[in-house]
Amino acid sequence: MLVQTVLFDKTGTLTIGKLVVVNTMLFLNVSIREFCDVAAAAEVNSENPIAKAVVEYAKKLRQKYGSAMEHVTEPKDFEVHPGARVSGNIGGKLVLVGNKRLTQACNVPLGPDVEDYMSETEQQARTCVLVIIDGRISRGFAITDPVKLEAERVVSYLRSRRISSVMVTGDNSATETAIAKD
């Protein structure tokens, strides 16, 4: 019996299995130091992979601009908003880190530049995370689980042998399509 089809689980098989920040967009002029401090503080208590990517990125960004993050401040009034992300009081400022659902729940207006960034991010199969300080959107993150370098070679090899590849994932169809193209 010849193999005709191979099923691949996406996360950890075709992708590296770890979320990383791949780009950001500045919407409000906030110092790098303040931005990194509040973003990391809001996410530090979360075990979510998105939170880990945000904290790691904030630490790297602070280091890149010459001031290592010694410690991350614990937020006051930390709250998890299921399906939307987190909020907390950090240095007297209300900080929200999350998605569009969080902005709607907290009545944070989205300008056209934010809407465009979110749409573009989603079309690239990336997760858009917004950092909101005192009701104003400061910055957006695009977060993804990068495709492994060898994944394309393996799928191409199988195709050359007339073996079809099928990706199995719980992601939405936009993410599935973008990963399949990669």
Image (cartoon, rainbow, N blue to C red):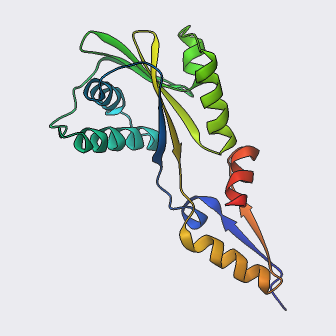
- Of 157 and 173, which appears nearest the observer? 157
Residue appearing at x 68%, y 49% in the figure: 170
- Of 133 and 96, which appears nearest the observer? 133
Image coordinates of residue 141 in percent, x first then y, are 48, 35
Image coordinates of residue 109 in percent, x first then y, are 57, 10
- Of 162 and 136, which appears nearest the observer? 136
Q: Quadrant of the C terminus?
A: bottom right
| Vertical order, 178 against 86 (above or below) | below
Instruction: Give the tally of numbered discs.
Output: 0
Residue appearing at x 55%, y 16% in the figure: 103
- Of 69 and 41, which appears nearest the observer? 69
In the image as oriented, which residue stretches furthest toward the left? 70
Image coordinates of residue 84 in percent, x first then y, are 54, 25
Occupied quadrant, residue 167? bottom right
Residue 144 is left or right of residue 138, and the answer is right
Occupied quadrant, residue 123? top right
Residue appearing at x 83%, y 90% in the figure: 2
Image coordinates of residue 92 in percent, x first then y, are 26, 9
Residue appearing at x 25%, y 38% in the figure: 62
Residue 14 is left or right of residue 139, and the answer is right
| Vertical order, 115 against 175 (above or below) | above
| Vertical order, 118 against 179 (above or below) | above
Q: Quadrant of the N terminus?
A: bottom right
